[in-house]
Amino acid sequence: MKYIVVLGDGMADEPIDMLGGKTPLAYANTPMMDALAAKSEIALVHTIPKGMSPGSDTANLSVMGYDPRKYYSGRSPLEALSIGVAMQPTDVAIRVNFVTLTDEDIPFAQRTILDHSSGEIPTEDAAVLLEAIKKEFENDTYHFYVGTSYRHLFLWDHGEVVGLDQPHDHLGEVIGPYMPQDPVLRDMMIRSYDILNKHPINSERAAKGRNKANCLWFWGAGTRPALPAFEQKTGKTGVMISAVDLLKGIAAGIGMDVAEVKGATGSLRTNYEGKAMEAVRQLLAGKDFAYIHVEAPDEMGHQGNVAHKVQAIEYLDQRIIRIVVEELEKAGEDFRMLIMPDHPTPIRCRTHTSDPVPYMLYDSRMPADNIGMLYNELMANNTGKRIQCGYRLMDRLLEMETV
């Protein structure tokens, strides 16, 4: 038996008027998911424990079967694991985004954040910008490390886990109330704008009509995590397939292999087929479990782009799920597939919420008992089934527990 999670990050949403009162998931043309729904368990699951921040960090830990209340120690430490940064017990890791701020002639704190991802700046350009930052700020206490695209890492020796706001929660807002209270981080943020705004890379981006990566934004502070190994916990060997450092870091933290896929970018234009075929290859080569993470629906939610969020879901259906299903059927493999988001990223608010998300658990051995059933938020709610503790869903997938 093979086990697969297909995770459409931020895929869940709310009814949208321009989609005829449907959510993007209900509106999208998803013939593969429609076909699977008749042989699936469809319900709602709470991936975010009450009182915790609705982030991809807590949510994906939950989906992977780890109780965030017990194991979560911050987002950035997980990303540090992904890029091979060895944290000491006294270190604090902090995520650093390259963001886009308005550049009119006004006091810094009165500027507005336009884009939390700087137009999904390529990693090679971001690395050059980070070198300029490192020359100004690095010393024995503060260190910067290149991540992926706009997502990077700051390590603070003997630092503090300070409260920091997520940039994607405040798009279109004046930044003053959300700047770091810590004086060092606040000073770095302000000075980073002077370094970056007129950097040649940003001048070139502006000339091409692209968003500048003109400021650092610190968030997601935490300490070194301690996670039990997935194989020891479940008895299954697994592989993570994602373009996002956070997911790779979770995999590294639980001793799971990470498969690198050429052209996997974390954007709408990622290599969907490459991810699907790598999952198939790993499963047919002996792995028991594959976790296929697709960032695109979440990014489109943050951008408030309805059409592209629908497109991301359709790509997930045809360019990932269809391929995995057809290839495993062709190979004669029995399999169970869990399709779900980690959290909602509604177009309305352009950030994450803590609402329960719909899941579809397909078993290739089961008869088609749910004729007429479709996979979306409303259908999942109407089943009346709900899992309150999201971390239990993995045991359900692996047939270690019933609900």
Image (tube, helix red, strand yellow):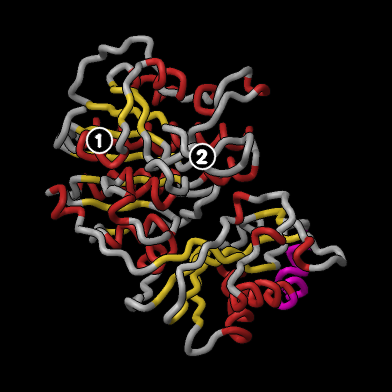
* Vertical side of 66 occupied by 204: above or below: below
| Quadrant assignment for the N terminus | top left
Q: Is the magenta stretch mostly helix, strand or loop?
A: helix
* Vertical side of 370 occupied by 219: above or below: below
Labelled pair 2, 1 in contact (Cβ < 8 Å) = no
Residue 260 in the image, given as x and y percentages of width and height: 37, 59
Q: Name the residue under label 1.
A: 328
Residue stretch in magenta: 194-208
* Vertical side of 299 occupied by 366: above or below: above
Which image quarter: residue 178? bottom right
Q: Residue at x 55, y 85 (%)?
A: 138
Give the residue type at disc 2.
Thr
Q: Which of marks 2 and 1 is nearer the N terminus?
A: 1
Q: Name the residue under label 2.
A: 353
Front residue of this view, candidates 381 and 187: 187
Q: How far apart are marks 2 and 1 (CA)?
A: 34 Å
Q: How many labels does the image show?
A: 2
Give the residue type at disc 1.
Leu
Which image quarter: residue 223? bottom left
Q: Residue at x 85, y 63 (%)?
A: 104
Q: Which of marks 2 and 1 is in front?
A: 2
Residue 241 in the figure: left or right of residue 267: left
Q: Which residue is drawn at 62% across and 76% down?
A: 183
